Image: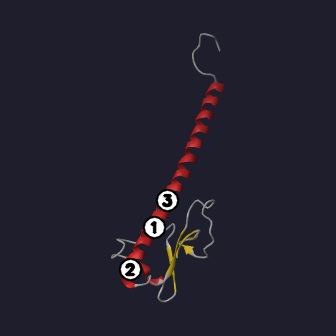
Amino acid sequence: MHKNEKGFSLIELIVVMTIVAVITVIGVVSFSAAGVKSRDGRRMADLSKIQVALELYRQAYGSYPQSVSVVANLVPTYLQAWPTDPKGSGFATYSYVSSGNPAFSYSLMAYMEDTSTYNVNTGYQCGTNMCNYVVVNP
């Protein structure tokens, strides 16, 4: 190449493309991790909403609903609709198990995507995945 010619050499282009690729990969990984945390936060908020509805039901009837009838008993009086998973209704569901008849305690379970943080073995299915997060009352 002559000293008068303007432009980039092949080495310079490869270095710039490598830097751009590394920055892109870092951005994609950070963005996907933020999405997982956001969806897990939504799942916790959904469980809190169900807990409030369950407490309202208990105040009205003296006990919590039986496991098989929780949705029918809470919707539409205490919840507008049963919450669905943020990834879609086919990804996971929220599970409810009551104890006793009448029921004076319950467990609400969900599948959290961040399995390094949420890894409780509940023994229950949450859709196609095993539930790995549980809220127990009391």
Which amino acid type is marked by label 1?
Answer: Ser
Residue 83 appearing in the image: no
Left or right: 114 in relation to 65:
right
Mark whose residue sits in front, 2 or 1: 2
Residue beneath the point at 46% across and 84% down: 66
Q: What residue does disc 2 label?
A: 59
Q: Which of 61 and 3 is in front in this view?
A: 61
Secondary structure under the numbered disc 3 in the rendered image: helix
Left or right: 89 in relation to 11:
left
Secondary structure under the numbered disc 2 in the rendered image: helix
Residue 45 in picture, x, y percent from top left: 45, 63
Query: Could you say which disc has been placed on residue 48 in the image?
Result: 1
Residue beneath the point at 42% across and 76% down: 55
Q: Which of 28 and 134 is in front in this view?
A: 134
Mark whose residue sits in front, 3 or 2: 2
Q: What residue does disc 3 label?
A: 41
Question: Mark 2 or 1 closer to N-term?
Answer: 1
Q: In this view, does 10 lie above or below 41?
A: above
Which amino acid type is marked by label 2?
Answer: Gln
User: What colouring does the structure picture have?
Assistant: secondary structure
Residue beneath the point at 56% across and 47% down: 30
Residue 54 in picture, x, y percent from top left: 42, 76
Whole-number angstrom distance, CA of label 2 to CA of label 1 = 17 Å
